Amino acid sequence: MSPGTGPEGGPLLDSGQVLDVDVAIVGGGPVGLALAILLQQQGLRTAVLERRTTRSSHSRAIGIHPPGLAALEGTGITEQLTSEGVQIRHGAARTRDRRLVSIRFTRTATRYPYVLALPQERTETILEDRLRSLAPTALHRGHTVTALVDTGSSVILAGISGADGGTGAVRGTGADVGTGTVGEDAGFAVHAAFVVAADGARSPLRGLLGAAVEGKVLPDHYLMGDFPDTTGDGALGVLYLEPEGIVESFPLPAGKRRWVAHTRTLLAEADAKLLATTVQERTGQQLDTAGNSMLSAFSVRTALARQLVHGRTVLIGDAAHEVSPIGGQGLTLGWLDAAELAPLLASGVRGVDIRGQLAQFDRRRRRAARTASAQARLNMALGRPLPPPIMRARNAALAALFRAPQLGDLVARRFTMQ
């Protein structure tokens, strides 16, 4: 087939035709892109189907933990990431009045003794550029998958192309495998040996599969924003443990800093001035509201699919497991999924029976997600509001405990997913 030109120069699948690939990846975010790169480098033909016509410019995840950097080594982009990001080698817990705890990530035994801070938009750009260098037509933007059929020996996806599609999905296709065509209402079809759902926490493909999910909404809300860094803290990551709720402060490239404040309710209509006022009242730090470049309010929910492998379709990233963004583990967790899955799919495409290995993958990745979720809940508990006398007593106990270097090293490893 000869695809036309889609948004941002990406290929647009022609209506009524079937694209044959080894692996189709639904979702062109950082996890889907990383998996596509790993597969392309193993000689597999991939298609990445992304619903959005343009990449979101709204910065979300910023932290890349050491295991995430190790998982990305196979993509060939770690050197560029580390050169552009801020290497956070030290962390500190404070109150407005005094310093409580210092943590050195450099004491941990790893190739990457730091957490790398880089806005997700930039990380995605680097990944997309790398994929295009390997396979210029692999990424298909503006393609919404609405149907999936697993034939037992392959999978057929069908959907709507040409613009941002909705999130609704309908089981069934109207695809005719024998003739290689689809019904006129399908828009496009992709025929693959395996399919991977990397389409986010609200995963429409997961809905098509009827995959059961265990989840809960937690009583935690946050307001975050990026501002010019006027703190003098440089590359230090800082947690302010205050009675009104935690305030987190992390360095970003280009002289910026991200601030995250725990709030009692979801402040969906908040502006930069409100976040700046909150930060100043709790920490004494003054933010330059005129230089605010991102603002977001969010609540926290967790979710874990009861099964990640469904025949020839596999869930990874947020489609498989959603953990609290506090602690920044979600992105790294997804990349670890991709790094473990890629060689399995390569073997499967080459005719190896990988059903047993996929079952083991399912168990391991679900276990890793439960561990990350537990760590995230601990992080959030640390940041919830407490009456001032209780907060002072708790902070004093933390300061005393951290006088033991072994505890500091243990916490550093936990916070960096090691």
Image (tube, helix red, strand yellow):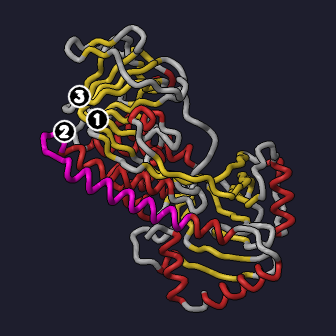
To which quarter of the image does residue 336 belong?
Answer: bottom left
Q: Which residues are magenta?
A: 348-376
Q: Which secondary structure, mark 3?
A: loop
Residue 233, percent from left and from top: 70, 69
Are the residues flagged by discs 1 and 2 in contact, CB closer than 8 Å? Answer: yes
User: Which amino acid type is shown beneath numbered disc 1?
Assistant: Val
User: Which amino acid type is shown beneath numbered disc 3?
Assistant: Thr
Closer to the eye: label 3 or 1:
3
Secondary structure that dominates the magenta span: helix
Closer to the eye: label 3 or 2:
3
| Residue at point 64%, 41% (across, down) | 58
Q: Is residue 154 magenta?
A: no
Q: Earlier in the sequence, mark 3 or mark 1?
A: 1
Q: Which residue is mark 3?
A: 151
Q: Is residue 376 above or below residue 391?
A: above
Q: CA distance from mark 3 to mark 2?
A: 15 Å
Q: Earlier in the sequence, mark 3 or mark 2?
A: 3
Q: Is residue 182 left or right of residue 11?
A: left
| Residue at point 80%, 42% (across, down) | 269
Where, quadrant-wise, is the C terminus in this rendering? bottom left
Residue 387, percent from left and from top: 81, 75
Say the numbered circle drawn on residue 349.
2
| Residue at point 65%, 82% (across, down) | 101
Work out which residue is located at the far top of the displayed protein and give it. 184
Q: Which residue is mark 1?
A: 23
Q: Specify few, some or many for label 2: CA neighbours under 10 Å numbering under 14, 14-19, or 20 or more.
A: some
Q: Which secondary structure, mark 1?
A: strand
| Residue at point 76%, 58% (across, down) | 263
Where, quadrant-wise, is the N terminus in this rendering? top left
Q: Specify few, some or many for label 1: CA neighbours under 10 Å numbering under 14, 14-19, or 20 or more.
A: many
**Closer to the camera in the image, 273 or 309:** 309
